Amino acid sequence: MKKTAYQKCLDKIYKLGRFGIKLELDTILNILNILNSPQKNYYLVHVAGTNGKGSTATYIASILQTAGFKTGLYTSPHLVRFNERISINGEQISNNHVIEAYEAVHAADTGKRKATFFEIATAMGFYHFSKEKVDWAVVETGMGGRFDATNVITPKVSVITNLSIEHTDYLGNTIKALAKEKGGIIKQNTPAVTGVSQPSGQDVIKQIAKEKSSDIYIYKKDFSTRKNPKQNTYTYKGLNNCFHNLIKPLPGDHQKENLSLALAACELIFETLKKTDKKYNFNETLVQKGLSTVIWPGRLEHVRQDPLIILDGAHNLMAARVLGKYLSATLNNRKLTLVLGILDDKPYEKMLESLVPCAQNIIITRAKINRSLDPEILKQAARQFTSKPVTIIEDVKQAVTHAIDTSDAKDVICIAGSLYVAGEAKEKFENDLEH
C-alpha cells in the first residue's frame, strides 16, 4: 500500500473525533457481532485504573510472550504513531494492516450511532489480533471501565491499578464513584487483582467481586514487591511464589506496584494453564527474561544523555506527584529545566506545585490539541511556586530545542505535563535521529 493510502486512512479515523466519548457498549458490540466476534478467538487480560495501566499491561504481555505465546497488546493513547496502540509480540501493527483493519471495521459500523475514534480503534485491535491468530491479548481500557469500549471482553483475569480522581464529567468526583466505574471490568467467576488503596474504593471493588463470585487479590495484602537493601534488585512475595532477585525494568519507585500487579495476574494465568499442561511453569527465570525486554515510552523515559533528557507524560495529579518525587530523589543538585504543557481539564495548579519547585528554569509550552491550557494561565500559576525564570515557547519542539541549547552537558531536562506534549517531543527526537 502507498503511504498516501495509509495517511488517508488515518485522516478518516481522526475525523471520527479523537475525543468523542459515548458511555455505552451497543455500538461496538454491533460492529464486533458483524465481524463474527473476533474478541472471542483468543484468551484475554483486561487492565483498568488511573495510572500504571500501560506499564502493567506491557509487563504481562512480555511475560506471556516469553512463555511462548503469540501475544497481542492494546494500549492508548499513542505518542507519535497510531500503530503504537496495537502490537503483537512487541511489533507494532503495519501500515497495511491498519488499512485492512480499518476497512473491515468501518464496513461493520452500521448502527444508529456511528462509532467514535476509540470504538473504531478498539475494534481494529480485536480484529487484527484475531486475523493474526494470537494466543493471548492484553487490553488496556481507555477511560473508566464499566462503559469503556474495551469492556466487551471476557478476560481470564482482570487488573485494576490505583485510583485518583479524573474525568469527573464521566466517572464521578469521588473515589467511591470512580471505583464503581473501574470495577465494572470484573466479570463473573473471574479473578481480579487490584492496587486500589483507598478504603472506600477497596470496599466498592470487593463488593463488586463478591456480587460476581470472583476472587479479589489486593496489593500489599495478598502480594507485594520490595527493594532489596543496598541492591538494585527486588523481592516479589506473591500469591504462591516468591522471587528474590528481580530487576525492575522501568524507572521510578511506583513501578514496584505495577510490577506486583502484573506478576499476581500472571500467577493466576499460569495456575490455570498448568492444570492443562505442566510445561507452563511460572518461575523467576521466566519472569526475569520477560521483564528484560520491557520498554514503555514516554513514562520516565531517558531519551538522551549529556544533558539527561527525561520524557514523562505526567498527565494527571498522581502522575505529577510521582514525577516530582522521582526528580527530587535523583537530581543530585543538577540544574533542572522543566518543559511543561498541561491540558485544560487537569488540576494544573496542584500539578505545578508538585513539579515547579524542583526546577531552576521553567519553559511553558502547548501541545497542538485544542484542549491545551493557555500558556499564560500556566505561567501565572507557576509563579506561585517559584522565583526562578518562567518562559513561554508555545511550540513544543521549539521549547525542547531551547531547553537543550540553554543547558550544559551535566544538566537535566524534563518534558512533562501531558502525553501529547511528550508525544510531540518524542517525534522531534525521532526525527533528529533520522537526520
Image (spheres, rainbow, N blue to C red):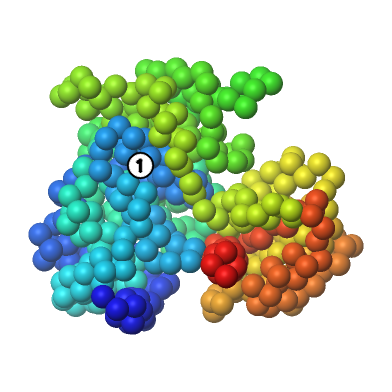
Query: As drawn, is 37 to the left or to the right of 328?
Result: left
> Image quarter for residue 8?
bottom left
Could you tell me which residue is drawn at 34 percent across and 66 percent down?
118
Question: Where in the figure is residue 279, as x and y percent of width and height?
Answer: 22, 22
User: On screen, 300 above or below 149?
Assistant: above
Examine the rendering and report whether any part of residue 376 can be seen.
yes
In-front residue for pair 397/312: 397
Residue count near mark 1 (Cα–Cα under 10 Å), binned few <14, some 14–19, many ≥20: many
Residue closest to the far right: 387
Could you tell me which residue is drawn at 49 percent across and 38 percent down?
258
- Quadrant where the C terminus sits is bottom right
In-front residue for pair 210/78: 78
Amino acid type, residue under disc 1 in the picture: Ala
User: On screen, 341 above or below 44?
Assistant: below
> Total number of numbered labels?
1
Question: Where in the figure is residue 308, as x and y percent of width and height?
Answer: 71, 52
- Quadrant where the N terminus sits is bottom left
Query: As drawn, is 233 to the left or to the right of 76?
Result: right
Q: Residue under circle 1?
A: 61
Question: Where in the figure is residue 433, as x and y percent of width and height?
Answer: 57, 64
> Image quarter for residue 147?
bottom left
User: On screen, 106 above or below 244?
Assistant: below
Q: Is mark 1 on a helix, strand or loop?
A: helix
Could you tell me which residue is drawn at 53 percent across and 37 percent down?
249
> Image quarter for residue 60?
top left
